[in-house]
Image: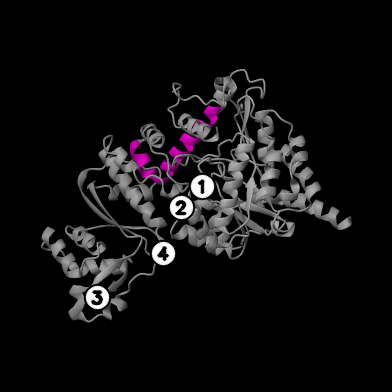
Amino acid sequence: MLEAFQAQMQRALLAPAGESRGTGVDLAPGPVAEARLKIYRANVQQSLAEALAAAFPITLRLMGVPAFRAVALDFVRAHPPARPQLAAYGGDFPAALVPLDAGAADMARLEWAVMEAYFAADASSLTAEQLAAFPPGDYAQLRFAPHPAARLVWLGHDVLPLWRQAQADEDLELSAPESGVGEILVLRPAEGIVCVALPPGAAAAIQSLLDGETLEQAAVAGLAVEPALDLQAMLHMLLAQGALAGASL
Amino acid sequence: MPEGAASLVTLPRRAGVGLRHPHVPAFLEGERPDIAWIEVHSETYLVAGGPRLAALEAIRRDHALSCHGVGLSLGSARGLDATHLANLRRLYDRLQPEQISDHLAWTGTDGAYLNDLLPLPLTAHTLDVVAANVAHAQDVLGRRLLVENPSLYMPLTLPPGVEAMPEPQFLAELAARTGCGLLLDVNNVAVCAHNLGFDAARYLADFPLAAVGEIHVAGHRREAFAPWVGPDARADGVVLIDDHASRVSDGVWDLLAGVLARTGPLPVLVEWDMDLPPLEVLLGEAARAQSLLDAVQAKVAHA
């Protein structure tokens, strides 16, 4: 009885408001219990939609409350969290926005990368001194361990300027992001979040490093995209922003 | 109980407050709030690293800590989530909380977490399920668990021939079978008594107070659910919602005083989760709880 009750009640709690067919609960018969069931349904769906609103605050501002709320409620009904960790809930939400609003979906992907970076494991960062300890002749064969917070995001809209404006001014009305290449590295040096807009070619080179390839392979990958890529400047940036946790030959 | 009653309470027998994000800076900088202990929601800190966890570890150095879970789903007919249990074990080993707790509730089935504490039919079969789950949790977590009485909104009707157990009796048997402690949420008693139509004083008279290791109080709101509820003779169309978004009601303070007169001092937590007030207001509520604790302490001293 308990197992059947729980399956039945869960179905009722994840049903759209107003949906009555197939959402009855045998242990909750009669008008009072049915009405009270709606309190639980509202708690479940609204609190999960609020969790998404907390994870994607700028996406919400971009879309406006009614549009965000509608898509968030649809999402929570179809994809409730798999575990009781709301900090990890919403990774699939950006994909759900794509058919509706591709610009907002890209903003959501950036916000999710920021969320993941914020809660990623702690690790000390590779320093320039540690790197200098390797023989210069071996640099081409170095492989790097990325900092657990480092996230590379490839976007089809230029959302980073909007994201920054939204952070700086909580009341600013946001305009829709323009399409264009957005390659962003999200990092967590010290205690804050940093988003770096990457120059052409850098994303390909950094992806190669994050995948555990050698510096030489990363250079080839980056230069294939942009022959003028400044690899030294890129490496300096990665060190300065704590993107790397270690290096080995 | 397999262990002596003395080990049931390891938190200070004083007033504590729930630690919520907006108040964290006040605990880290300047003059630290004068409070004996804090409680956090365990699941909020199930993250790999970063500033949130680091801040709690820093605050924990100066305060006794209770980790209060909302996601074990102790009433799940299908048992507990092994990954979640392992994650909690890692967190508790890291934070070394004085006490841990969760609820007499379920939070989802079939691989879903619904972010709410859902009601259970209290039957002999459910007691078997919850007892097995509590024993399993205590085993994996390596700690005694306190189980809290939930707030309820919906009356459940059992099939003919299935007998309902009163909640105090259910919790007493659960504690006896598993050695778990109980967390008595006095606000939840007031909320359930109104919503389900029973007498809070009688419920508390039956409650197994010897197993209680912690008490919660919080605010609730009255909501007229007329359009949904219709003619609800049981509660005049008014439902009490356990929203933890306001001061503790006078009725709940009175119930708390009555409980403490019977138990003597226990750790008492003021919970405030939504519409957070300035920290001073929350500490003021804790001071009111502390004055009730001081009063029973004085009586114990004079006895």
Q: Are the residues tagged 3 and 4 within 8 Å (C-beta)?
A: no
Q: How much space separates mark 2 and mark 1, taking CA atoms?
A: 9 Å
Chain for mark 1?
A: B
Please determine if labels 1 and 4 lie on a single subunit. Answer: no
Residue at image point 40% right, 42% down:
A171
Q: Nearer the viewer, mark 2 or mark 4?
A: 2
* Element carrying mark 1: loop
Quarter placement of the C terminus of chain A: bottom left
* Element carrying mark 3: loop
Point out the residue furthest to the top here: B231
Quarter placement of the N terminus of chain A: top right
The magenta span reads A37-63
Q: Is residue B178 above or below residue B243?
A: below
Residue at image point 43% right, 38% down:
A49
* Kind of residue sitting beneath label 4: Asp
Q: How much space separates mark 1 and mark 4, taking CA atoms?
A: 29 Å
Query: Residue beneath label 1, please?
Result: B80
Answer few, some or many: residues within 10 Å of disc 3's Cα (few below 14, many 20 plus, some between 14 and 19).
few
* Kind of residue sitting beneath label 3: Leu
Please determine if labels 1 and 3 lie on a single subunit. Answer: no
Q: Nearer the viewer, mark 1 or mark 3?
A: 1
Q: Please tell me the numbered disc located at residue A122.
A: 4
* Kind of residue sitting beneath label 2: Thr
Task: Tell whether A142 sits left or right of B49.
Answer: left
